[in-house]
Amino acid sequence: MTELLALIPILLQILLFLIMFGMGMTLTLTDFTRIGTAPKAVFTGLINQIVLVPLIAYSIVLLIPMEPMIAMGLMICACCPGGAVSNLFSYLAKGDTALSITLTAISSIITIFTIPLIINFSLDAILGASGKSIQLPLGKTIFNIFKLTALPVFLGMLINYKFPLTANKSKPTIKWGSIIVIVLALIFMVMKLEEIGDSFTFLKASFISVVLLNIATLGVGFLSAKGFKLTTKQAATISIESGMQNNVLGMAIAIGLLESPEMAATAGVYGVIMCLIAVGMIRLYRNMILKEEKV
């Protein structure tokens, strides 16, 4: 068991690589160029994911008393892009799946550069002097995130390009397999937390802030899209992309790069909460979209 616990940081990175590789097998170059056909929807979604979500998280950190490590975990969640699961939930909600895939693809590239900047700002703002000793080196961190996110995406896209029929047949397996891999990552995270304390204690400590972040980002995503006169289908997609973060990436960063299972706890809790809330949102958005399409 001790040997397994020691391997968890590496195992999380392997699981993240597999998730991003699978997502890459569902992507084509069109997903990166769709910004030209639906610029307003894409820009609205990206502004939500990259700017508004971290701002909402930092506002919660300032307003809600919480342990510094929990607060850092919340910021790590907020700076991560949407994951492959958000594409599945957008599909189940009858949202704009093409828009969802485009937002996930583009944000996964942009956040390679924004994640270390937001995390270093948060370390300084939340942990103060003690945070300076664990600041992430910019160049090294960008490379580490690149090899765990963009690289497997590009490899997956290469497989999709070379073997399109095989990749297309694999899409259902990839979507549901991503959920299985995320559950496995959550199990590893709980095991790591039990090594240093009681995982239920971390759950209680982060629960309120995680629920607030998820509900707020879902709401802001939807309302901002409607404010720009986008369709309900597009608004629902942007809402889901804004509220569903790549929590496995967050856990991998917290445990692998920052060597802090306590920070990873928030990402783990967020992964569970966002999926539970999203199940309810799927039903709500499906009904709204179907009603709009009948008009």
Image: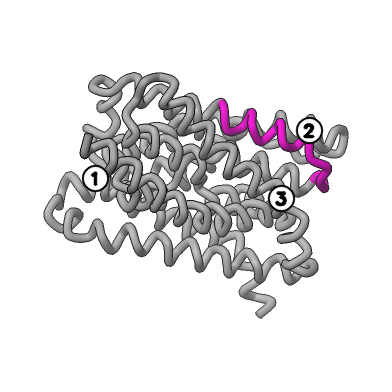
Quarter occupied by residue 121:
top right
Q: Residue at x 22, y 32 (%)?
A: 30
Residue 132 versus residue 94 in the image, above or below: above
Mark earlier in primary sequence (1, 3): 1
Give the main secondary structure of the magenta stretch.
Answer: helix
Q: Position of residue 148 (x, y in %)?
A: 47, 47
What SS does tag 1 mark? helix
The residue that label 3 is drawn on is: 208
The residue that label 2 is drawn on is: 62
What is the span of residues highlighted in magenta in the rendered image?
52-68
Measure how far apart labels 1 and 2 are at the Cα level. 44 Å
Disc 3 crowd rating (10 Å Cα; few below 14, some 14-19, many 20+) is few
Nearer to the camera, 205 or 113 = 205
Identify the image's colour scheme: rainbow, by chain, secondary structure or one colour: one colour
Q: Residue at x 47, y 25 (%)?
A: 224
Nearer to the camera, 167 or 51 = 51
Numbered circle sitting on residue 167: none
Left or right for 259, reference 114 = right
Question: Which amino acid type is marked by label 1?
Answer: Leu
Task: Specify the quadrant that holds the N terminus.
Answer: bottom right
Mark earlier in primary sequence (3, 2): 2
Tell which residue pokes out farthest to the front in this image. 295
Nearer to the camera, 198 or 118 = 198
Q: Position of residue 89 (x, y in %)?
A: 38, 51
The residue that label 1 is drawn on is: 158
| Disc 1 and disc 2 in contact, CB within 8 angstroms | no
Measure how far apart labels 3 and 2 are at the Cα level. 14 Å
Question: Which amino acid type is marked by label 2?
Answer: Leu
Question: Which amino acid type is marked by label 3?
Answer: Ile
Measure how far apart labels 1 and 3 are at the Cα level. 41 Å
Residue 68 in view, yes or no = yes
